[in-house]
């Protein structure tokens, strides 16, 4: 049985990843700020209250896992989302390295995907101002820190531009740095199918020290 540590399991994306992992018989240790938010009951689920900004705490919780999957997000309505993302993610990265876990899968953002040659989504003017700080901080962590990481076997998994609550179809297309769009030019993926693709990558790794993306 594979064992993963999941950061941010009570959130929108994290809860979908948790559900998909458990459905495949993967043991999930969920590190969350508020354990009471996890209402799922499953013999493969262990819920731990933890501060993911505390390197030592995460090191202890992660030891022995096959991988750490992070869906950490300070909260889209958090006025300090930019600063907290750039402060906490390097600590998570350091904790994974110290724990001895070699595989790190991160829920990325779509902001740094290219929508046309030389133009990233974050620079297109298409992202609402309300979420721009969070989009920018994830992108900066990926470009300035994670992409330079040589010790861990990491992936930064960018969703499509529209990540919506929908159905699990397990039918989608993967890409690398260019946004995946359909025949109408739309970039979308259900959070359920995003979780399928994430756990597919966990079980059958195809990407190493790189970003990839998904869409219909």
Image (tube, helix red, strand yellow):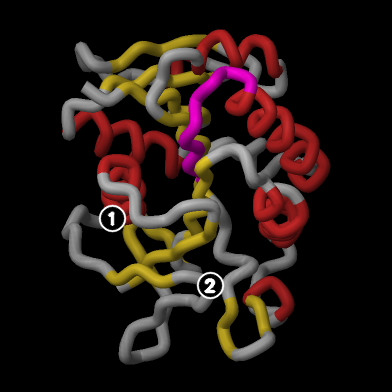
Which label lies toward us, 1 or 2?
Answer: 2
Locate the N terminus by quadrant: top left
Rendered residue at 46%/62% (across/down):
212
- Whether 17 is drawn above or below 46: the answer is below
- 187 left or right, relative to 112: left
> Which x, y percent locates residue 43?
20, 12
**Secondary structure under the numbered disc 2 in the rendered image:** loop
* In magenta segment, residue 3: no
| Residue that numbered label 1 is attached to | 193
First to last magenta residue range: 98-106
- Front-most of 37 and 190? 190
| Residue that numbered label 2 is attached to | 177
Q: Earlier in the sequence, mark 1 or mark 2?
A: 2
Q: Quadrant of residue 98?
A: top right
In the rendered structure, find residue 174 and report the number of the disc placed on it: none
Q: Quadrant of residue 19?
A: top left
Rendered residue at 69%/72% (across/down):
122
**Secondary structure under the numbered disc 1 in the rendered image:** helix
């Amino acid at each position: 049985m594979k064992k993963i540590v999941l950061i941010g399991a009570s959130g929108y994306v994290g809860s979908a990843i948790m559900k998909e992992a458990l459905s495949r018989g993967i043991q999930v240790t969920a590190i969350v700020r508020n354990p009471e938010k996890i209402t799922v009951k499953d013999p493969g689920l262990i819920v731990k209250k933890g501060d993911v900004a505390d390197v030592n705490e995460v090191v202890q919780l992660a030891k022995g896992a096959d991988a750490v999957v992070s869906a950490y997000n300070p909260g889209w309505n958090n006025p300090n989302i930019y600063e907290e993302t750039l402060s906490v993610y390097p600590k998570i990265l350091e904790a994974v390295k110290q724990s001895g876990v070699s595989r790190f899968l991160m829920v990325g953002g779509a902001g740094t995907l290219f929508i046309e040659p030389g133009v990233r989504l974050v620079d297109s003017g298409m992202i609402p101002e309300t979420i721009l700080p969070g989009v920018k901080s994830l992108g900066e962590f990926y470009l300035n820190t994670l992409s330079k990481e040589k010790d861990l076997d990491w992936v930064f998994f960018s969703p499509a531009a529209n990540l919506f609550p929908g159905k699990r179809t397990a039918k989608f297309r993967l890409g690398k740095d260019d946004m995946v769009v359909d025949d109408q030019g739309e970039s979308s993926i259900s959070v359920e199918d995003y979780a399928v693709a994430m756990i597919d990558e966990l079980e059958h790794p195809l990407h190493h020290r790189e970003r990839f993306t998904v869409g219909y």
